[in-house]
């Protein structure tokens, strides 16, 4: 089962236009070990493990900060993709 957004005409057209630059890897609907974003979520959750924000908005701000920090860690991201069997 694929996400409906991924099956949309707009996404399909974009993928056709960029076929030389991207390879699509269809993943099972639920297989956290095969999805690099699950590893990203785990890294952020670990960073927030002892956080005690006073409000949901503060928690969201902290999570966004951690995701932004993660995007500047290509070494970590590469490992998460390799763990999922996607070699970059």
Image (spheres, grey):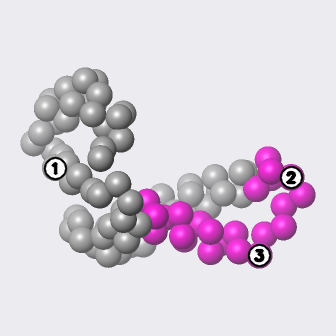
Residue labelled with disc 1: 23
Distance in Å between CA atoms under marks 1 and 3: 38 Å
Q: Is residue 76 magenta?
A: no
Farthest residue, direction right: 54
Q: Is residue 78 left or right of residue 66?
A: left
**C-alpha separation, residue under disc 2 versus residue under disc 3:** 15 Å
- Residue nearest the observer in this picture, 48 or 30: 30
Question: Which residue is located at x 41 percent, y 66 percent?
Answer: 32
Who is closer to the viewer here, 57 or 2?
Answer: 2
Say if mark 1 contacts mark 3, CB within 8 Å: no
Q: Which mark is residue 50?
A: 3
Q: Earlier in the sequence, mark 1 or mark 3?
A: 1
- Residue under label 2, please give it: 55
User: Which is the main secondary structure of the residues drawn in magenta?
Assistant: helix
Mark 2 and mark 3 in contact? Answer it, CB < 8 Å: no
Residue 24 image offset from top left, x and y in percent: 19, 48
* Residue 39 to residue 68: above or below: below
Q: Which residues are magenta?
A: 36-59
Residue 72 location in percent, x, y? 48, 61
């Amino acid at each position: 089962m694929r996400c409906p957004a991924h099956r949309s005409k707009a996404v399909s057209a974009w993928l056709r236009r960029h076929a030389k630059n991207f390879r699509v890897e269809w993943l099972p609907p639920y297989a956290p070990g095969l999805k690099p974003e699950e590893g990203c979520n785990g890294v952020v959750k670990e960073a927030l493990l002892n956080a005690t924000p006073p409000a949901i908005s503060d928690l969201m701000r902290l999570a966004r900060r951690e995701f932004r920090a993660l995007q500047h860690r290509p070494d970590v991201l590469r490992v998460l993709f390799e763990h999922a069997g996607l070699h970059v």
